[in-house]
Amino acid sequence: MPRTPTSDIARRKTDHLAIARSGAGAYARTPLFEDVQLLHNALPELRWNDVQLKTRFLGKTLAAPLLITGMTGGTKEGRALNRALAAAAQELGIAFGLGSQRPMLVDAASAKTFAVRDVAPDILLLGNLGVVQLSALKTAAVEKLLQSVGADALAIHLNVGQELAQPGGDVDFRGCLATIRRVVKELPCKVVVKETGCGLSPAVARALDRAGVAAMDISGAGGTSWIAIEAQRANDTQATRGDLFREWGIPTAAALGMIAPLGLRPSLIASGGIRTGLDVAKALALGADIVGLAQPVLVAASQGGQKGATAFLAGVIDGLHTACMLVGARTIAELRQRPRIVTGVLSQWLAQAPR
């Protein structure tokens, strides 16, 4: 049977899930949150129920400042995972991002793999397209794509590293910033721009601020390396390239620590190597507005479906709640004001950060 664009995409999505779930695409290094210490408060003067984690983000109230970041779609397995994850988000009152909707551009039938509104009618739902694909689409077509899944906002993903290691990946990234500006100007919903594991630099953050995006997901190094994942699927030059650059990127805590003090207008999402509620608390203390998780939620959902994903995320929320108690913070806003100590490699990153 001849290969088609649809079958190629489906095969790639299946490979991505298998490798990501196995952990074989993980960075060897960390996102550097171990270098962030929150100062213990032995007299918090709080009851457990005094702590409130509710957060407003992109016009919606979240029960906790968490986002399940986009991972999958376009396959039968992707459909099951999207629905399980979206249902978990609905139960917990947090946000959910769809994986790249690129399959919908070549196969209208794949739309059902991204359909989650029947199980998650109230969540903040992010659609997802790559910036290179967007450059070839009229804004009206993008709006129609988002409306077909009931998305509240569009996440535009940037993945230069992944594409350069991916068999048949894109190699022309000219005009991407102009595409973002156009979509922000013409699309009636909010636009989020997200990296895919290599992090955002201060210069890129400033450019996205000027482009008018509503939020930025810094998606730093330390979690899943999509360069490493593609290297395992590639041959010859691309495999060599992927192996060489599998550790490439700005660690999540470093990207956040460099960008948050700039005081830019877009909200900040911190993702990349987030595993626990304590990681979430540290990311929020460094200036994130909300925090995204992917691979550990994928594993939990793969092993236990919606119940597994819900249980894992409930544990993350409990860890965040506990951290707030231990620093004496009633709210996420108060958590951001509590003392923190930055040590080790992260302190070196921030000391040498470009201004």
Image (spheres, rainbow, N blue to C red):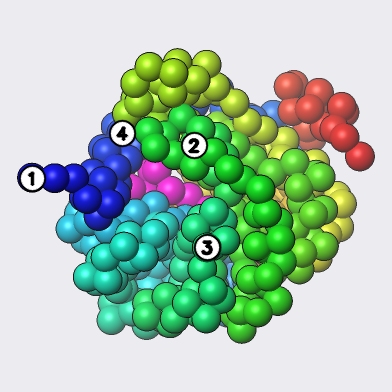
Is 316 left or right of 354, judged from the image as shown? left
Residues at discs 4 and 3 in contact (Cβ within 8 Å): no
Going from N to C along the chain, the mark reached first, 4 or 3, is 4
Going from N to C along the chain, the mark reached first, 3 or 1, is 1
Residue 69 position within the rendered picture, expressed as x and y whole percent measured from the top left: 47, 55
> What's under tag 4, amino acid-wise?
Ile
Choose top left, top right, bottom left or bottom right for residue 332: bottom right
Residue 297 is one of the magenta-drawn residues: yes
Which is nearer the eye, 319 or 260?
A: 260
Badge 4: few (under 14), some or many (20 or more) residues near its Cα, within 10 Å?
some
Q: Is residue 304 above or below residue 273?
A: below
- Report which residue position mark 4 lands on: 19
Q: Which residues are magenta?
A: 291-298
**Is residue 298 visible from the viewing direction of this image?**
yes
Q: CA distance from mark 4 to mark 2?
A: 14 Å
- Report which residue position mark 3 lands on: 136
- Report which residue position mark 1 lands on: 1
Q: Is residue 133 above or below residue 225?
A: below
Q: CA distance from mark 4 to mark 1?
A: 25 Å
> What's under tag 1, amino acid-wise?
Met
Residue at image position (65%, 79%) is 186
Closer to the camera: disc 2 or disc 3? 3
